[in-house]
Image (tube, rainbow, N blue to C red):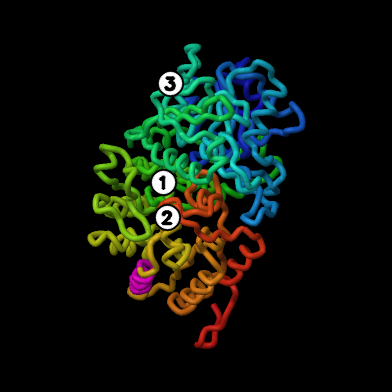
């Protein structure tokens, strides 16, 4: 609920928890605050949600009163600085999570602003708990691109009491149960807090001051942080900041398959709340309303991506029965046209298998599951369960088309000698809308090594297979490519080589490329700040001039004629 009238109708005088978000209130399983609200509701708690409150007055933040147990604060589904600014720091005029689409409701550094808003209007209030991707990825000393400096852990700036990091479903329940008992949740796994004293049994990270003084110490700190995100193998972390200490307890456990199914079965309306609807519709619902999240986590470990740090590097999978049940439920909606926008996850073809060693011992801290050179021999790629799932979904009466729009690792298709071909055939026949999006990002090997992406031969091999299958099926479907300009290590000469490759090998002109954005919680951001390869500690080129970043992008998207006399 989000209005006093709703409280009155239920006869509630006070809420247990009030959640504040940088998004409008969208009741969807894809929206973190909505998921938190439904989890707490299922446990019997009275929950209110305030989406995009006015920050100049108490009108919104005070409309539901004061919670009995805690305030939950999130910057929204996207880090507010990423949401508000392009890679070249130009303000974005649109916002897919704001009614009407105009970007006029989400403040910069929303987590800090909302916490201060609560403190301004409620003295000695219930604890404030931070969550969501903005808080999760800024929980330790981090490079902030928009101010071009290292910032303290967000708890030191936000003046909040606790922070739940990662997906945190189990940490959420453990925290609320502790508060219900009148206990401080300082022992809850998956929680961060500030202490006057260090935690001696935890890994002592380089201090904030050390990181400011010496860039290699910042790399050391991030390595410890990155290696301690797995519930099985991680240790707690402790970082000194100006005489106080950021304490990060070990991560909470991952959800089991039945628990994943249970969350997906909660009664989401999949709509924008009527309170917000008078200001217009939200664009994000066009894609998420009738999409299905099949799993959480990603072990791809692209260095520019924070999914592995936030969601984890172990796949947690829903059952086929749960996913098919969700597809059947779509057919009950009056506005469902028979089209499922996406059946996938952070990486669609990681559904249904994992490394047995990782499931037993946790993620390795000495090698990756996959990098720019090879796949670990312990990771047995197997698309068979995914094939079976897709067949079951499209067999649901009332389903005309079920697209797979999430990212797909083409190197994993190549790697799966038993089922990769059949999986790609399923996609080509049934699950692609005229084009399939893949993300090679670049083609120069030294840049790919820094990105953690597979080599260009992998893409060439995949394209041949994709083209063959489309020819066999009599279909004219194409590949579109995500490309990145100005990633650490990338020069204008590298972009010219990328352009040559796309023209001569792929026979196409890229229509778009994105300029690299250094976001908290990624190795690429560490590279951008330090100008060092974090593995070798050798200096690397990093383009930091905005105009030259744009030039790198322009090199690869500039139209040119092919020898056959036409332009793509």
Tell me what residue is drawn at x 56 percent, y 34 percent.
Answer: 153
Labels 1, 3: front one: 3
Foreground residue among 302 and 513: 302
Q: Quadrant of residue 458?
A: bottom left
Identify the residue at image location x=36%, y=70%: 457
Residue identifier under label 2: 402
Q: Nearer the viewer, residue 24 or 89?
A: 89
Q: Are marks 2 and 1 in contact (CB under 8 Å)?
A: yes
Label whose residue precedes the other's in the sequence (3 or 2): 3
Residue 41: assigned label:
none
Between 113 and 247, the one lying in front of the other is 247
- Name above or below for residue 408 compared with residue 219: below
Q: Could you tell me what secondary structure mostly forms the magenta stretch?
A: helix
SS for callout 3 = loop
Where residue 224 appears, as percent x and y from the top left, is 42, 39
Instruction: Kindly check if marks 3 and 2 are in contact, taking CB atoms under 8 A apart as contact.
Output: no
Work out whether mark 1 precedes mark 3 in sequence or the reverse, and give the earlier one. Answer: 3
Residue underneath mark 1? 327
Write down the region rendered in magenta. 458-468
Image position of 498 with respect to 146: above or below: below
Residue 343 in the image: x percent, y percent? 42, 51
Q: Which mark is residue 187?
A: 3
Secondary structure found at label 2: strand
């Amino acid at each position: 609920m989000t209005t006093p009238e709703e409280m009155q109708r239920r006869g509630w005088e006070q809420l247990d928890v009030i959640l504040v978000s940088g998004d409008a209130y969208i009741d969807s399983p894809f929206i973190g605050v909505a998921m938190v609200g439904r989890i707490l509701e299922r446990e019997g708690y009275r929950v209110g949600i305030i989406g995009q409150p006015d920050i100049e007055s108490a009108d919104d933040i005070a409309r539901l009163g004061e919670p009995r147990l805690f305030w939950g604060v999130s910057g929204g589904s996207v880090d507010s600085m990423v949401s508000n600014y392009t890679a070249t720091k130009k303000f974005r005029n649109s916002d897919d999570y704001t009614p009407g689409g105009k970007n006029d409701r989400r403040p910069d550094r929303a987590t800090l602003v909302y916490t201060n808003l609560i403190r301004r209007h409620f003295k000695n209030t219930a604890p404030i708990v931070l969550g969501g991707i903005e808080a999760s990825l800024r929980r330790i000393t981090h490079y902030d691109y928009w101010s071009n400096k290292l910032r303290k852990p967000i708890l030191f700036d936000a003046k909040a009491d606790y922070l739940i990091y990662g997906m945190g479903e189990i940490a959420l329940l453990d925290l609320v149960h502790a508060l219900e008992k009148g206990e401080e949740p300082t022992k809850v796994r998956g929680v961060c807090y500030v202490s006057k004293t260090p935690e001696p049994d935890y890994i002592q990270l380089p201090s904030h001051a050390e990181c400011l003084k010496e860039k290699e110490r910042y790399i050391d700190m991030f390595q410890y942080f990155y290696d301690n995100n797995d519930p099985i193998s991680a240790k707690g972390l402790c970082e000194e900041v100006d005489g106080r200490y950021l304490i990060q307890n070990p991560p909470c456990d991952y959800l089991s398959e039945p628990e994943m199914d249970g969350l997906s079965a909660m009664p989401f309306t999949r709509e924008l709340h009527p309170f917000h609807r008078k200001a217009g519709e939200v664009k994000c619902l066009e894609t998420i309303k009738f999409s299905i999240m099949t799993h959480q986590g990603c072990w791809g470990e692209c260095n520019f991506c924070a999914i592995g740090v936030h969601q984890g590097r172990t796949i947690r999978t829903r059952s086929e029965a749960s996913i098919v049940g969700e597809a059947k439920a779509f057919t009950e909606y009056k506005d469902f046209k028979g089209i499922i926008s996406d059946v996938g996850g952070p990486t669609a073809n990681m559904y249904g298998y994992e490394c047995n060693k990782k499931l037993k011992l946790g993620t390795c801290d000495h090698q990756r599951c996959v990098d720019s050179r090879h796949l670990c021999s312990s990771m047995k790629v197997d698309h068979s369960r995914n094939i079976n799932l897709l067949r079951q979904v499209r067999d649901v009466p009332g389903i005309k088309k079920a697209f797979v729009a999430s990212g797909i690792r083409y190197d994993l298709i190549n790697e799966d000698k038993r089922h990769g071909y059949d999986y790609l055939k399923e996609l080509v026949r049934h699950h692609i809308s005229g084009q399939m999006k893949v993300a090679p990002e670049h083609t120069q090997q030294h840049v790919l090594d820094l990105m953690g992406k597979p080599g260009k031969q992998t893409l060439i091999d995949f394209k041949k297979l994709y083209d063959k299958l489309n020819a066999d099926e009599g279909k004219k479907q194409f590949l579109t490519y995500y490309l990145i300009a100005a990633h650490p290590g990338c020069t204008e000469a590298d972009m010219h080589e990328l352009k040559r490759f796309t023209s001569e090998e792929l026979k196409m002109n890229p229509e778009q490329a994105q300029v690299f954005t250094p976001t908290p919680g990624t190795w690429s951001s560490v590279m951008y700040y330090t100008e060092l390869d974090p593995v070798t500690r050798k200096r690397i080129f990093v383009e930091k001039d905005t105009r030259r970043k744009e030039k790198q992008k322009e090199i690869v998207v500039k139209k040119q004629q092919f020898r056959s006399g036409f332009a793509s």
